[in-house]
């Protein structure tokens, strides 16, 4: 089934710019369509039921709040994209999926998209017990994640990350080429974003990209062997989850 994202913004250039940004930071969506006419967008939503909608609020004919009211019964995640921060209270009251201020920053957009992907994964598992194939997971890892350090914000391809270790309130990223990057955010923060992409928190301080695991070693308490031949121990309570991975 195709994954669709709709954008509604009466300013044609703004809608096309957001479309280009989404397509540049992730290939999760099969189709990204921008509408500058909210009535046309509403008809397309009713007919095609996209997976997520990014909508401006202040628009002539029909504003973003009115669009949401008309489609609430469809339970489609709505992200408000607006230049006006005073709409945040409205967004909270309407329980919209997320809220992004213009001009749209790529790292904020990426965090919203990763939040949506994680939500979508939970929905799939809870409704149809969907189990992605290895090829599905590898394809999803073409997306990027924003990694905050003390000095910068970095957009990194997920498929280059082999593992993440927790160091108090920091997270240390390790990459396929041997490089490392220390983030100023916690391992729990990144766990929430990376688990839908094939990562498993194998013990308290270690998050592993299972795509880079070559072997499960059962001696002692158990180890995962990465392509680099590094051995990573896993906790006993994670064994069943790891075994499920090897059935993919």
Image (cartoon, rainbow, N blue to C red):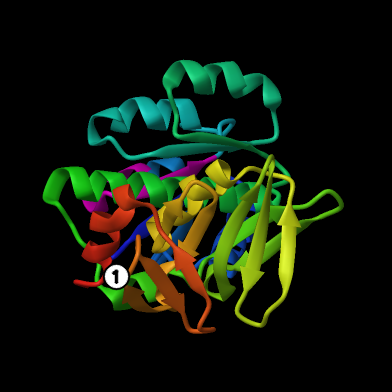
In the rendered image, the residue lying farthest to the front is: 220
Residue 44 visible (yes or no)? no
Q: Quadrant of residue 69?
A: top left
Is 50 or 182 nearer to us in this picture?
Answer: 182
Residue 197 in the image: above or below residue 193: below
Q: Position of residue 226 (x, y in %)?
A: 47, 78
Q: Quadrant of residue 130?
A: bottom left
Q: Position of residue 188 (x, y in %)?
A: 54, 42
Residue sitting at x 42%, y 56%: 202
Judge left or right: residue 171 versus residue 131: right
Judge left or right: residue 214 versus residue 147: left
For the residue labelled by badge 1, is the local secondary structure a helix, a strand or a loop? Answer: loop
Q: Is residue 3 magenta?
A: no
Residue placed under numbered mark 1 in the picture: 218
Residue sitting at x 33%, y 74%: 217
Q: Position of residue 8 (x, y in %)?
A: 49, 46
Is 84 or 43 nearer to us in this picture?
Answer: 84
In the rendered image, the residue lying farthest to the right is: 151
Is 134 or 110 nearer to us in this picture?
Answer: 134
Instruction: Provide the residue span drawn in magenta.
Output: 42-55
Q: Is residue 51 magenta?
A: yes
């Amino acid at each position: 089934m195709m994954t669709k994202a709709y954008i509604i913004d009466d300013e044609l250039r703004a809608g096309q710019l957001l479309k280009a940004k989404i397509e540049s930071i992730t290939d999760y969506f099969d189709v990204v369509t921008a509408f500058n006419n909210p009535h046309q967008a509403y008809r397309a939503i009713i007919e095609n039921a996209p997976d997520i909608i990014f909508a401006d609020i202040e628009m002539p004919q029909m504003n973003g709040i009115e669009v949401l009211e008309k489609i609430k019964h469809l339970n489609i995640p709505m992200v408000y994209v607006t230049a006006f921060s005073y709409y945040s209270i409205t967004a909270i009251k309407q329980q919209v999926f997320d809220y992004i201020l213009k001009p749209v920053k790529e790292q904020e957009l990426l965090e919203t998209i990763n939040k949506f992907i994680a939500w979508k994964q939970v929905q799939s598992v809870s409704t149809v017990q969907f189990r992605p194939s290895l090829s599905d997971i590898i394809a999803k890892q073409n997306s990027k994640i924003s990694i905050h350090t003390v000095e910068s914000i970095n957009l990194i391809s997920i498929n280059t990350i082999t593992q993440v270790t927790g160091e108090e309130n920091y997270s240390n990223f390790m990459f396929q080429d041997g490089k490392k990057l220390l983030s100023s955010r916690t391992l729990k923060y990144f766990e929430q974003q990376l688990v839908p992409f094939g990562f498993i928190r194998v013990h308290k301080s270690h998050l592993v990209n299972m795509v880079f695991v070559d072997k499960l070693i059962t001696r002692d308490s158990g180890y995962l062997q990465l392509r680099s031949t590094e051995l990573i121990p896993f906790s006993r309570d994670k064994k069943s989850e790891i075994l499920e991975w090897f059935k993919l």
